[in-house]
Image: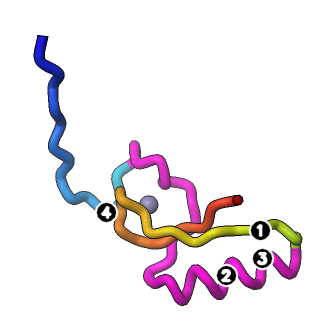
Amino acid sequence: MPRRHFVKKHVPYEHKAPCGRKRTFTSETEALKAAESQVLTSAVQLKVYQCPYCTKWHLSKM
Ligand SMILES: [Zn+2]
């Protein structure tokens, strides 16, 4: 039985995207700035990554 292959349309804000509730940044610089200030206030290490779903930038705990 062949597996069905879904081709995702390019929809930036899809409800089912796993990043739906995450903070979104339009550039790596923005995300890095936010990560930096969050590290100062909460001492949590964050990494910045570009999202394959919405092609924007998010923060993720390390
Ligand atoms: Zn995303």
State the quadrant of the C terminus. bottom right
Queried on whether the Cβ of the residue with tag 2 lies below 8 angstroms from ligand 1, the answer reads: no
Element on which disc 1 rests:
loop
- Badge 3 is on which residue? 38
| Classed neighbour count for the residue bearing mark 2: other residues with Cα under 10 Å, few (<14), some (14–19), many (≥20) | some
| Classed neighbour count for the residue bearing mark 3: other residues with Cα under 10 Å, few (<14), some (14–19), many (≥20) | some
Please tell me the numbered disc located at residue 34: 2
Q: Which residues are magenta?
A: 15-41
Which quadrant contains ligand 1?
bottom left
Closer to viewer: mark 4 or mark 3: 3
Horizontally, is 40 left or right of 25 in the view? right
Percent from the top left, x then y, of residue 57? 48, 72
Q: CA distance from mark 4 to mark 1?
A: 27 Å
> Which kind of residue does numbered mark 1 sit on?
Gln
Percent from the top left, x then y, of residue 26? 44, 81
Q: Are marks 3 and 2 in contact (CB under 8 Å)?
A: yes
Closer to viewer: mark 1 or mark 3: 1
Q: CA distance from mark 1 to mark 2?
A: 12 Å
Q: Are marks 4 and 1 in contact (CB under 8 Å)?
A: no
Q: Is residue 49 above or below residue 36?
A: above
State the quadrant of the N terminus. top left
Q: Earlier along the polypeptide chain: callout 1 or callout 3? A: 3
Q: Residue at x 86, y 81 (%)?
A: 40
Give yes or no for residue 59 being in the magenta stretch.
no
The part of the image, by quadrant, that contains residue 48 is bottom right
Please tell me the numbered disc located at residue 45: 1
Closer to viewer: mark 2 or mark 4: 2
